[in-house]
Amino acid sequence: MRESGWWMNRPWGIGDAGIGDAGIGDAGIGDAGIGNAGIGNAGIGNAGIGNEGIGNAGIGNEGIGNEGIGNEGIGDASGLRTAHARIAGAGTMVGNGCCGEMRASSGAHGVGERIPIMATIVVFHHVLGLTTGVKALADRLRAAGHHVHTPDVFEGQTFATIDAGIAHAQAIGFSTCIERGVQAVADLPPDVVYMGLSMGVLPAQLLAQTRVGARGALLLHGCVPVSEFGDEWPAAVPVQVHAMADDPFFVGDGDFAAAQALLEQTTQAELFLYPGDAHLFTDSGTQDYDAEATDVLIQRVLKFLEKM
């Protein structure tokens, strides 16, 4: 992870000021997250499993059984799950598949027609800040009909270089960046997909692992060891990791090893490696930007969201 100085140095101070003091405990899950607005009021009881979820269209009909794990998930793709594939073309998947698509059994959509399900997604920016490139990436998800939030943990400041962004993050504290990320989702329902870009992986992965009800995680340009935020990856949370195969910060700083370990922990994980050595290749305002790779990534992300 290019921007954090890497997890082994623990620059965000999880033990001192991150999760314990100001993160999940005070402002996140406990006070405003799950307890007040999450599962009890609007989550599982009213619109989730009971009415539209598992009972009518999910697992029973064509979810896991027909299209999920059996056909295109573990069976077809898991052979590469621990190999560091040298990529040709638009990118190679390393890992396991997710669940099947939700399809209607009756009603207005007709038999066998996939029900479009819009996700709530929180996108945490990288160390350059909430740039126009990050906003453009979020807009592509909005264009597909999803509800997207883009918290600004730098509170309006953006930077032209990685070094300048790192200096700012160090000045305010990586623990502050994580804390602001946690606070940003406190009033959101629990069934959120968390997306993080490099430094943004820190709050995204923390919340995916520790905020009960998380719907999924999308980790771009970075991956933190699961042990940083808990004992194991939540079994019900699908996750994708996306990076360039020769990004020296992803491969050399430990992110790739962390992603491999994640694949070993859960069948819900996928790792996508793209040809090239750029770090922030999804930010259209940087020299790292790769339009073709970003297009492929967006297609994979949208498919991921459809399958949940």
Image: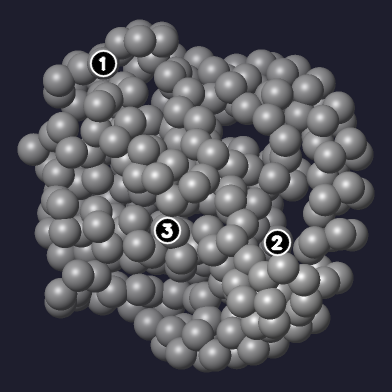
Residue 222 visible in image: no
Contact between labelled residues 1 and 2, with CB atoms less than 8 Å apart: no
Badge nearest the viewer, 1 or 3: 3
Protein image colouring: one colour
Q: Mark 1 sits on what residue?
A: 158
Q: Is residue 104 above or below residue 284?
A: below
Q: From the viewer's perspective, is 201 left or right of 93?
A: right
| Spot occupied by residue 179 in the image (x, y as percentages of width and height) | 57, 20
- Sequence-first tag of 1 and 3: 1
Quarter of the image where one finds residue 9: top left
Q: From the viewer's perspective, is 60 left or right of 204?
A: right
Q: Is residue 158 above or below residue 35?
A: above
Mark drawn on residue 301: 3
**Residue in the picture at 51% in, 45% down:** 146
Amino acid at the residue labelled 2 = Ala
Q: Nearer the viewer, residue 84 or 77?
A: 77
Q: Mark 2 sits on what residue?
A: 236
Q: Nearer the viewer, residue 125 or 292?
A: 292
Residue 163 visible in image: yes
Disc 3 secondary structure class:
helix
Label 1, label 3: how far apart the Cα atoms are: 26 Å
